[in-house]
Amino acid sequence: MSKAHDHSSRRWPVAFAAVLVVYAVVAMSLAMSLPVKDGARDWTAPLIPGGWMAWSFPTAMFFLTIFALLACMAVWEYARPGGHPRIGILRFETTRGDRLFISLLGSAFIHLAWLGLSDLSLWWALVVSVLYAMVVFRTV
């Protein structure tokens, strides 16, 4: 391994921390920009009243989280290039990015099914989705 690559590969924690800091700052900025209604923050109100799209806090956080996951995957690829392709239970080769995509797609279906079949809080669907993602990253 070259000295340049060895030196740069030790800087990945700084890049990872930067992604997390940007995520936290943007999330806090979004939360602080929420309108206050009757003394409490209105978590589902549009962030841009009268805008062309109803960007609510949960919608913005969803897309911010997807962006942060992709940025973290980029840092991971920088730190450990190659994606570690492997053949799992699906019997075809997948990389980290493939497993992230499968996790996100499956989580979307879990949430849609949860909305259609259950009256329980969506937080439980999030827990199921995180467990599903862990299984995908371990076995697929």
Image (cartoon, rainbow, N blue to C red):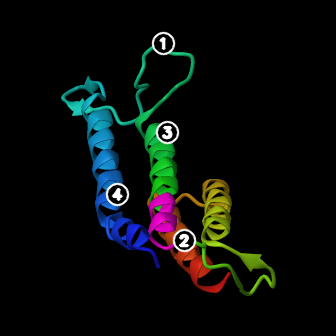
First in sequence: mark 1 or mark 4? 4
Of 70 and 2, which appears nearest the observer? 2
Measured in 3D between alpha carbons, the distance from the residue under mark 2 to the one under mark 4, in whole angstroms, is 15 Å
First in sequence: mark 2 or mark 1? 1
The image's mark for residue 59 is 3
Measured in 3D between alpha carbons, the distance from the residue under mark 1 to the one under mark 4, in whole angstroms, is 37 Å
First in sequence: mark 4 or mark 3? 4
- For disc 2, the neighbor class at 10 Å (few under 14, some 14 to 19, many from 20) is few
Question: Type of residue at label 2?
Answer: Pro
First in sequence: mark 2 or mark 3? 3
Residue 121 seen by the camera: no
Q: Position of residue 24 (x, y in %)?
A: 29, 48
The furthest residue to the right: 91
Q: Where is residue 86 in the image (x, y as percent from the top left)?
A: 69, 83
The image's mark for residue 81 is 2
- Residues in magenta, as a range: 73-80
Secondary structure under tag 2 reads loop
Question: Type of residue at label 3?
Answer: Thr
Residue 20 seen by the camera: yes
Query: Can you identify the residue that label 1 sits on?
Result: 50
Query: Can you identify the residue that label 4 sits on?
Result: 15
Q: Classify residue 87 by image quadrant.
A: bottom right
Question: Type of residue at label 4?
Answer: Ala
Q: Classify residue 88 by image quadrant.
A: bottom right
Measured in 3D between alpha carbons, the distance from the residue under mark 4 to the one under mark 3, in whole angstroms, is 26 Å
